[in-house]
Image (tube, rainbow, N blue to C red):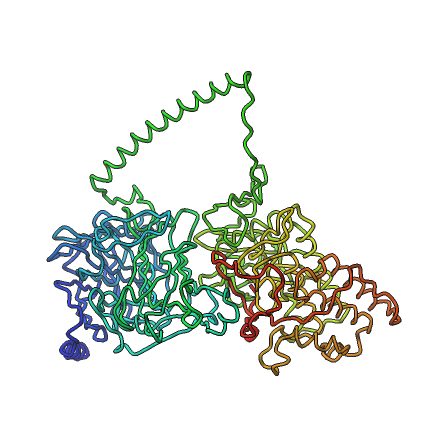
């Protein structure tokens, strides 16, 4: 009775379908393992999934499994114990959509989560060694396949070495012809520079890897005429959300025109967008101020990808005024993109295709939008509505074809292998002959002339030996995964060991969450207690920061720098393993927790420890290193409150000999960020000094550097504290728990030191060596309670620095694309402070 009612509703809903809905000819929708029709009445158009028993062979190898606890489509599954093939009769040639639905469950005799198998179609490997975890979420694999035959064969092959009960399975299958305008050979995607061009795009096999509704909610088959699912972009957003805006309009306002219709993307995708959170006043006050909105997507290496970006400008007051830049990776995909050149009216959608090859060393595709140099302060903006990333199949969409899997190859592949083998053999012989000739020539020339010396190019890191560390590209934030460094293998820790040591990344073991990801408490197999930092896709950092931290910490050791125990990059993971610091971040011991109050002496000693670590970075290594992200969450406390500086993902080399600074894009944490570095993009070790000065005030006052819950004059700790310092009443704002417990001379020396660290111009700040000396002196004053007369020398080792007003310090991490020109900024310290807007943004997470 329930089934009859469902079918009745299905036909009634079909009667009311919009005339614009896509209706494929001769579609195949199979409910695998089911013996009855499964209607999906909420889909638009509604669909019936029919039993699969007439579509596969041989019958003897199949098992029908059921799970009454699942939704109708996933309540059954077809499992195979041997190689089996579905065959679909097709009415036409061309691009077809193939969707495979997987949902593992356990019945009395089988656990589908243990199944491991291959799937192929049209002699192309779609899935290799595929398995489905036992979760409550179905896994849907979607492909666009060019079919030039009357039949589509889909083969499932269980892995014989997986388990005693070797299985392959599938819950549902969709096969139907795609609209002709979805992917066509007339589509000419722009190839990102240095990437491989893709010809005859419609004849390629494509796997949909990511389909994103930017700035909007999840779009389901109920709102997509091709029954696609578009997921929100939050998980992939690289840029802090405070720097972008979600925008939406009514789907009725979307004005489809020639070339784009709902089969390209539904109105529910084009009616939402993410734009830049930027105002004309921000640009007018600082014309060179800029940032990008970036999304980061995990992908498989060694493949080309089709990247389709969807745009629809319903935001601009005058749509012809909008210009913006689009980047893929660190290269322009579309510079000065002007939507008015693509469409004839506001709210009219269009899309652009680009292709990108991802080499072995990379695992991410970054897509960014930012304002164009052609935009004016009043029209500065950028927009993105949707994004699709599709993997291009060169013969396999999931790793190398296993010769033992039994998947047959076409004659073309065999011929290609034969030709490549012959060519390879000839090349090897020719290379050997060339080497012999060169050796003979060198031997003959040694006694006659001295060979020309090759210029020595010093790499930032180079250590000879078996376990070498080598980085061929410059060690900057622009270092890309393509640099392909050789990490110390002695530091590598297997993913299995880390997984066991953290109890499968148990949330109960989380001891911190930062921009890079979660930090877990763990124990290695040898009993070593460690802190495990696991990178996530939605984190503010990625592979370059992961790479940089390994390279840096594998080279330096210091009592007051957190030690790197090891790392893991298996299975596209980015995991760093550090020594465990029992007391956690300094910030937790100062405010926002119930931990015991630190005494003034303890606080001074912690500051001294951190200063020693920073001083070593600046002066103790062969080339000075700038940390760039000094803050209270990056100073960790161990046993007996021993302090160590941590988190070197944003660190970079300081200026070379004879140079005064490094010109680079802004990275760091607002609230601690050097205002001079922020304004004129000149980075020196004095930028760390400024950040450390903010930490000193935080230690003294036990409050965040930016606190929006306070009155306007107290929001910014630097401004508030220095106002009281200049009045000579610093004791009125100290941590109330320390009142009456600080020696007045020690407090005075500490306040002077913090004030000098916060001088707005870098040249006026002391070095970390000077800061360290003054902090040690402040500790001596506290311990001995020395009294000084007003006329006595304060004991400074540096010259007296003038008191300067401190500008508004930004308050959340930002990464500004250093590829953008900032030549307009003044070469000297500007009197113009950073926009007050930034002091209102708070990000309390550590990296």
Residue at far left of view: 91
The residue nearer to you, when weighing 33 against 566, is: 566
Q: Is residue 166 visible?
A: no
> Where residue 267 appears, x then y in whole percent?
27, 72
* Quadrant holding the N terminus: bottom left
> Where residue 11 appears, x then y in whole percent?
14, 77
The residue nearer to you, when weighing 157 against 597, is: 597
Residue at 47% in and 64% down: 291
Q: Is residue 194 above or below residue 535?
A: above
> Where residue 567 appears, x then y in whole percent?
53, 52
> How many marks overall?
0
The residue nearer to you, when weighing 111 against 492, is: 492
**Taking 794 as reference, is 403 left or right?**
left
> Where residue 325 appears, x then y in whole percent?
39, 61
Q: Is residue 548 visible?
A: yes
The residue nearer to you, when weighing 122 against 727, is: 727
Quarter where residue 793 is shown: bottom right
Q: Is residue 700 above or below residue 356?
A: below
Residue at 66% in and 55% down: 561
Q: Is residue 489 above or below residue 68?
A: above
**Taking 678 as reference, is 3 left or right?**
left
* Quadrant holding the C terminus: bottom right
Residue at far bottom of view: 711
């Amino acid at each position: 009775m329930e089934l009859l009612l469902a079918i009745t509703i299905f036909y009634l809903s079909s009667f009311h379908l919009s005339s614009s809905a896509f209706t494929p000819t001769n579609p195949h929708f199979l409910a695998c393992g089911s013996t009855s029709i499964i209607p999906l009445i909420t889909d638009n158009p509604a669909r019936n999934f029919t039993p699969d028993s007439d579509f596969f062979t041989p019958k003897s190898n199949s098992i029908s499994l059921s799970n009454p606890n699942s939704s109708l489509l996933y309540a059954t599954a077809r499992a195979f114990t041997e190689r089996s093939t579905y065959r679909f009769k097709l009415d036409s040639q061309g691009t077809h959509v193939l969707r495979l639905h997987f949902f593992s469950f356990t019945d009395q005799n089988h656990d589908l989560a243990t199944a491991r198998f291959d799937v192929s179609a049209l002699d192309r490997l779609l899935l290799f060694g595929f398995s489905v975890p036992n979760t409550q979420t179905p896994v849907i694999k979607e492909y666009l396949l060019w079919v030039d035959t009357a039949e589509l064969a889909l083969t499932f092959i269980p892995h014989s070495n997986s388990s005693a009960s070797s299985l392959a399975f599938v819950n549902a299958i969709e096969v139907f012809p795609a609209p002709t305008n979805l992917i066509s050979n007339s589509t000419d995607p722009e190839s990102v520079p240095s990437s491989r061009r893709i010809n005859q795009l419609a004849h390629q096999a494509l796997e949909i890897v990511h389909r994103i509704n930017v700035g909007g909610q999840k779009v389901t088959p109920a709102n997509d005429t091709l029954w696609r699912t578009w997921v929100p972009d939050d998980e992939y957003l690289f840029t802090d959300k405070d720097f972008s805006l979600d925008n939406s309009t009514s789907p009725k306002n979307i004005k489809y025109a020639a070339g784009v219709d709902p089969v390209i993307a539904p109105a529910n995708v084009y009616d939402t967008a993410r734009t830049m959170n930027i105002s004309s006043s921000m640009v007018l006050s600082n014309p060179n101020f800029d940032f990008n909105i970036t999304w980061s997507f995990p992908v498989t290496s060694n493949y080309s990808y089709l990247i389709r970006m969807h745009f629809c400008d319903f935001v601009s007051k005058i749509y012809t005024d909008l210009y913006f830049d689009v980047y893929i990776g660190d290269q322009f995909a579309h510079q000065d993109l002007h939507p008015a050149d693509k469409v004839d009216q506001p709210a009219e959608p269009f899309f652009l295709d680009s292709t990108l090859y991802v080499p072995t060393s990379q695992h991410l595709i970054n897509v960014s939008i930012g304002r164009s140099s052609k935009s004016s302060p009043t029209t500065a903006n950028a927009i993105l509505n949707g994004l699709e990333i599709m993997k291009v199949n060169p013969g396999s969409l999931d790793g190398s074809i296993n010769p033992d899997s039994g998947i047959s190859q076409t004659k073309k592949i065999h011929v290609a292998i034969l030709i490549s083998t012959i060519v390879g053999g000839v090349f090897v012989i020719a290379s050997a002959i060339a080497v012999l000739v060169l050796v003979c020539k060198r031997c003959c020339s040694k006694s006659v002339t001295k060979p020309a010396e090759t210029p020595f190019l010093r790499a930032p890191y180079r250590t000879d030996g078996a376990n070498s560390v080598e980085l061929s590209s410059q060690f900057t934030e622009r270092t890309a995964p393509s640099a392909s460094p050789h990490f110390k293998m002695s530091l590598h820790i297997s993913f299995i060991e880390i997984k066991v040591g953290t109890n499968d990344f148990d949330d109960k073991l989380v001891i911190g969450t930062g921009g890079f990801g979660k930090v877990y408490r763990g124990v290695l197999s040898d009993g070593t207690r460690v802190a495990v930092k696991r990178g996530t896709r939605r984190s503010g950092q990625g592979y370059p920061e992961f790479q940089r931290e390994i390279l840096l910490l594998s080279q330096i050791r210091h009592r007051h720098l957190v030690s790197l125990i090891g790392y893991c990059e298996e299975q596209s993971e980015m995991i760093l393993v550090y020594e465990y610091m029992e007391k956690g971040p300094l910030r937790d011991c100062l405010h926002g927790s119930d931990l015991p109050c630190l005494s003034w002496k303890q606080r001074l000693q912690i500051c001294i420890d951190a200063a020693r670590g920073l001083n070593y970075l600046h002066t103790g290594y062969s080339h000075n290193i700038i940390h760039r992200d000094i803050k209270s969450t990056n100073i960790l406390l161990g046993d007996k409150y021993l302090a160590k500086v941590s988190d070197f993902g944003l660190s970079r080399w300081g200026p070379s000999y004879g140079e005064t600074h490094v010109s680079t894009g802004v990275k760091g944490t607002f609230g601690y960020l050097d205002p001079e570095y922020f304004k004129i993009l000149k980075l020196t070790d004095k930028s760390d000094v400024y950040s450390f000065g903010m930490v000193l005030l935080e230690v003294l006052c036990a409050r965040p550097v930016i606190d929006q819950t306070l009155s306007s004059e107290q929001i910014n700790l630097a401004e508030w504290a220095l106002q009281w310092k200049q009045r000579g009443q610093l004791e009125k704002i100290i941590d109330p728990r320390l009142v009456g417990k600080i020696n007045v001379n020690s407090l005075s020396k500490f306040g002077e030191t913090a004030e000098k660290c916060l001088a707005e111009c870098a040249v006026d700040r002391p070095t970390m060596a000077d800061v360290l000396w003054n902090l040690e002196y402040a500790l001596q004053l506290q311990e001995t309670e020395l009294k000084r007369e007003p006329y006595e020398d304060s004991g400074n080792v540096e010259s007296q620095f003038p008191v300067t007003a401190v500008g508004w310090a930004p308050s959340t991490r930002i990464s500004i694309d250093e590829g953008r020109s900032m030549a307009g900024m003044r070469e000297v310290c500007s009197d113009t402070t950073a926009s007050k807007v930034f002091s209102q943004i708070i990000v309390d997470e550590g990296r």
